[in-house]
Amino acid sequence: MTERLKTLRDWMFRGLLFEADAEKFRQSGIRIGADQQEVEARLLEEEMAPFPLDLRNEALQMARLYALLYCFENSVRQLVKERLQDKHGLDWWAKGVPSKVQKFAEERQKTAQQDSWLEGQKTELLDFVEFGHLADIIIQNWEDFSDLVPTQHWLKQRMEELEKVRNFVAHHRLLLPSEFDRIEMYVADWNRTVGL
């Protein structure tokens, strides 16, 4: 065995021994390393401390819904991109997206690149498409989505309802528990239908 392989083997063995010992410490109640969730919760608590308790509680309720809508919207974007790439290849944007949606996204991207101090993701044109445009893209390419989505009417109905909710949440309006239930039902229905 070469010296390099021996060094690598010894390093890996020491790592495994440490993990085994660390797990024994954790089981006996000794903390090893930082608990990321605890650190995040403490930071959030510190940042929100100046605000009234009722606002903080409402914000935490709405954060769950924001996370659900974020995942839903971006999974629809991924689905659109994957399906159109499968059909049209690298030219999926030009061939599969309606021209009015392309122009809208290109203008939004241009504005974001020129006028914004924000450094977030700015390269993917599909990220500059409005939520409602996603249904337009799917309907224009219906043959590529008809095996997943029951009808165009079903798609439009779900997407319009969820767009209203999305905009409501984006403008920091509190929803009722029954509305949370309906949104969760719509998203679960979509996920079941498209096979997520």
Image (tube, grey):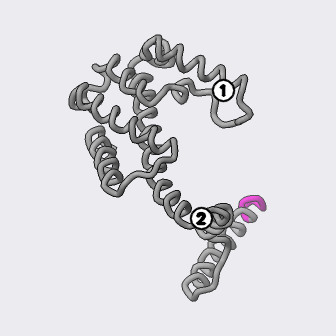
Residue beneath the point at 62% across and 27% down: 123
**Looking at the rendered structure, which numbered label has been put on residue 52?**
2
Type of amino acid under label 2: Pro
Which image quadrant for residue 10?
bottom right
In this rendering, the answer to whether 187 lies above or below 49 is above
The local secondary structure at tag 1 comes to helix
Look at 71% across and 30% down and name the residue there: 116
Q: Is residue 2 magenta?
A: yes
Magenta stretch prevailing secondary structure: helix
| Magenta stretch holds residue 48 | no
Pointer 2 and pointer 1: residues touching (CB < 8 Å)? no
Residue span colored magenta: 1-6
Comes first in the chain, label 2 or label 1: 2
Horizontal side, residue 68 vs residue 9: left or right? left
Image location of residue 55, percent across then percent down: 54, 60
Q: Residue at x 61, y 84 (%)?
A: 25
When the figure is inspected, residue 148 is found, relative to residue 70, above or below; the finding is: above
Measured as percent of width and height from the top left, residue 69 is found at 44, 44
Q: Amino acid at mark 1?
A: Ala
Question: Which residue is identified by label 1?
Answer: 112
Residue 82, position as x, y percentages in the image:
43, 29
Task: Give left or right: position of 43 versus 85.
Answer: right
Q: Looking at this view, is 19 or 13 the one in front?
A: 19
Q: Secondary structure at mark 2?
A: loop
Q: Where's the C terminus, which quadrant?
A: top left
Q: Determine the image quadrant of residue 139.
A: top left
Is 65 or 188 nearer to us in this picture? Answer: 65
Residue under the image location 63 percent in, 62 percent down: 51
**Location of residue 173 in the rendering, given as x and y in whole percent from the top left corner:** 47, 47
- Identify the residue at the far bottom of this view: 28
> CA gap, disc 2 to disc 1?
34 Å
